Amino acid sequence: MISIVTWNVNSVRPRLQHLLNFLREQKPDVVLLQETKVENDKFPTMEIEELGYNIALNGQKTYNGVAILSRFVLEDVQNNLPNFADEQARYIEAVVCLKNSALRVASVYVPNGQDLASDKFQYKMEFLDKLRAHANNLLELDEILVLGGDYNVAPEAGDVFDPQGLAGNICFHPREREKLRSILYLGLYDAWRAKHPHQHAYSWWDYRGNSFAQDKGLRIDHLLLSAKALDVMHDCEIIRTERERDTPSDHAPVTVWLE
DNA sequence: ATGGTCGACAATCGA
């Protein structure tokens, strides 16, 4: 059994103790981090390596930044989508070398988009288009593939606390949901939803307005699995307890276990 | 009622 986690940590440095405790307690095999908000030479590499992890980084100052932590050797590390000259560090991909097979993973940080009138929304649409094109190429390899990350899109009504009230809002707008579906229709599967067809649960809660206490959240952090990965999925859970801690990230980790 | 709360960074900006 191997476990793969996606977690938007909202800056790795103030979250380091939470992250190290998570690694010690849960002992995940692979961790896909988003919003590390730090350049590579300032990433807490030593502390994480001491716990037995290999690290691949695509860091950036102040904003964005993604990383892969792995108990197994990482090969073929790819920073940024190969078909998209992006100045923002939002994508890193690698092959995880298992004993008798290989697994390809990516950590994805889809732009937030701000609001529909913003040019940041156009950038979000373009990023999702480029991610779709690259995912289509990856699927041709017919591998065990896990594209984990903060997609900043809640797929369906059951993934938001107020589907009517949020219908036109960023992260739940029909245009974003359509783009996410276009990626899923390539043959990728939302691991958590596959395991919990009828449940309502969230992975992100705004710091503002006491949102977590009222469970006013969105499920925007996803582990998208190729068919071969879904075939061997054992479980998938949102680790809500991480959001309950003092000074948490606004996102909870999501873990998938593969046999 | 464009508020509210974080993080980075040093006055606002992004989320």
Image: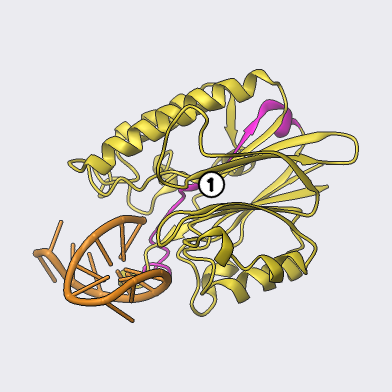
Chain colours: A yellow, B orange
Residue A95 is a magenta residue: no
Q: Nearer the viewer, residue A18 or A223?
A: A18
Q: Position of residue A4 (x, y in %)?
A: 69, 49
Residue furthest front in the image: A41
Q: Is residue B7 above or below residue A37?
A: below
Percent coordinates x, y for residue A65 in the rendering: 49, 54
Task: Please report, as a chain letter, where disc 1 is located.
Answer: A
Q: Residue A106 sits in which quadrant? A: top right
A5, A135: nearer the viewer: A135
Q: Which residues are magenta?
A: A211-231
Question: Where A47 sits versus A3, above or below?
Answer: below
Instruction: Indicate yes or no whether the magenta region holds residue A227.
Output: yes
Would residue A162 be found to the left or right of residue A5 on screen?
A: left
State whether residue A214 appears in this view: yes
- Give me the residue at 26% from left, 46% from top: A169
Q: Which residue is mark 1?
A: A149
